[in-house]
Image: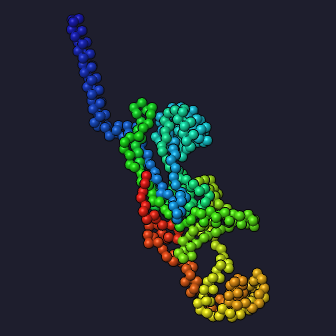
Amino acid sequence: MKQRQENLRIYFIYAFFILFFFSLVTRIAYLQIVQKDLFKKLAQNQHLKIIPLKGERGRIFDRKGRILATNLNVYSIYADPKLIDEKIRTAKALASILNLDNKEVLTKLRKKSRFVWIKRKITPDQKTNIEKIKLKGIGFIKDRMRFYPQGRLLAHTLGGVNIDNEGIEGIELFYDRYLRGKDGLVSVVSDSACNSLFFSPRILKPQRGLDIFLTIDAQIQYWAETYLKETIEEYSAKGGSVVVVQPMTGEILALANCPSFDPNYISSTPQRFIRNIAVTDIFEPGSVFKIATLVAAVDRKPFSLEDRIYCEKGNFKIPGSVLHDWKPYGDLSLKEVFKKSSNIGVAKIATTLGASILYEYIKKLGFGQKKFGETHPKDTVLGSRRLCAPRDDYEAKS
C-alpha cells in the first residue's frame, strides 16, 4: 500500500512537469508564431529609431566666385527619454552646459517619445563637456549649419535660414527649392544592454542642393555699403539704400541697405532690420528720372539743343501745386535744362511732348517690366540673369 502511494506521488509529479512543459511550449509557440508581428514591432520601437538627415544646402557665390553663403559641420544633441533613469540630474547637467532652461530640458526628458532634440547645432566645447560626463540616453548627430563668412555684407539680399536650414528671407527663401538638398535617413539602434547607441548600416544618403551664382560683385557691394553708412552718419539720416546696376544688361552689381544685420543671427534680429527697403518700399525717383524726358526730347526733337526755355525764375504754378527750382533760372537751353536739373524746364519739355509720347519712351527704357535688356542663355533654371544664374559647369560635390 505504501509503495503504491509513493508510485502515485511520482506519477503525479511527472504529470505536473509534463503539463507545465506542455503549457510552456504552447505559450512560447503562441508568442513566437501567433503574436510574432506584435512583439517584432515592440522590439523595433524599443531598439530602432528612424532619424531624418538633412541634405546639404547649396552654396551662394558672387559673380566672381567669392563665397557669400556656405555650410559648416556641427553637432546636434538628442535624448532617448526611456533610457534615462536619473532625469532630474541629467536635465540639470545638460541645462548647465548648453545654457538652457532646466525645466524645459526636464520636460523633454519626461516625454514618452524615443527621440527628442535637446539642442540643435551646439559648439565643439559643449559637445566635449557633455561627452566627459557620459550621460545615459544622450547622443549626438552630425548636422550642418548655414554660415555667412562675409557677415553683414549683402545681408538683405541673401536673407537667411531657420534652425532646419530652410530659407526664410531673401535669396535663401526665393530659391529655397533649388538650394535645399534632398533629405536622407538613418536607423539608430541600441545594444541589448541599452548602454550605447550606434548607427546601423541602413542609411539613405542625403543629396546636396544646387549652388547659385549672383550677379552681385562683392567688392562693389562692400564699397556701396561703406559709403552708404558714412553718408548716413554724416547727415544723421535714419537710413538709406543703394542699388548699382549694369546699364547694358540690367544686372544688379550691388544692393545695400542701412541699417543692416548679420544673417548668421537672423533668428534673433527684429523684422524691421531684415526688410529689404530697396525692394519693398516705394519712393520717388526724383531727378534721375529726368533721363526719360531727355531721351524722348532728343529723339522727337520738339526743341533744338539751343532753343531757349524760360524757367520762370524758380517758381511755376501748375494745377494743384507750384514747381520750384533749387536756384532761380531764367532762359536756359535744352542742354542747360538737364545740366542744371531744372524742374520747371523739364516740366515744360514734358508738357510739350505730351503724356502719350512720354509714356512710350518710359516703356522703351524698360520701366514697369520684369526683364530688360540681354538675358543669360542659361536663364531657364534660376530666373533672371539680372540677379543670379546657375553655374554652367556645376557639379554636386559632397
Q: Position of residue 204 (x, y in %)?
A: 38, 49
Q: Position of residue 143 (x, y in %)?
A: 49, 47
Residue at (43% x, 61% y) in the render: 394
Q: Hey, which residue is sitting farthest top in the picture?
A: 2
Q: Position of residue 18 (x, y in %)?
A: 25, 21
Depth check, front residue: 87 or 219: 219
Q: Is residue 204 left or right of residue 164?
A: left
Residue at (62% x, 58% y) in the render: 152
Residue at (60% x, 86% y) in the render: 295
User: Can residue 306 be seen?
Assistant: yes
Q: Quadrant of residue 301?
A: bottom right
Q: Name the colour scheme.
A: rainbow
Depth check, front residue: 6 or 319: 319
User: Can residue 81 be seen?
Assistant: no
Q: Quadrant of residue 316?
A: bottom right
Depth check, front residue: 7 or 147: 147
| Tag count | 0
Residue at (60% x, 88% y) in the render: 296
Q: Quadrant of the N terminus?
A: top left
Q: Position of residue 281 (x, y in %)?
A: 63, 70
Residue 174 vs 308, above or below: the answer is: above
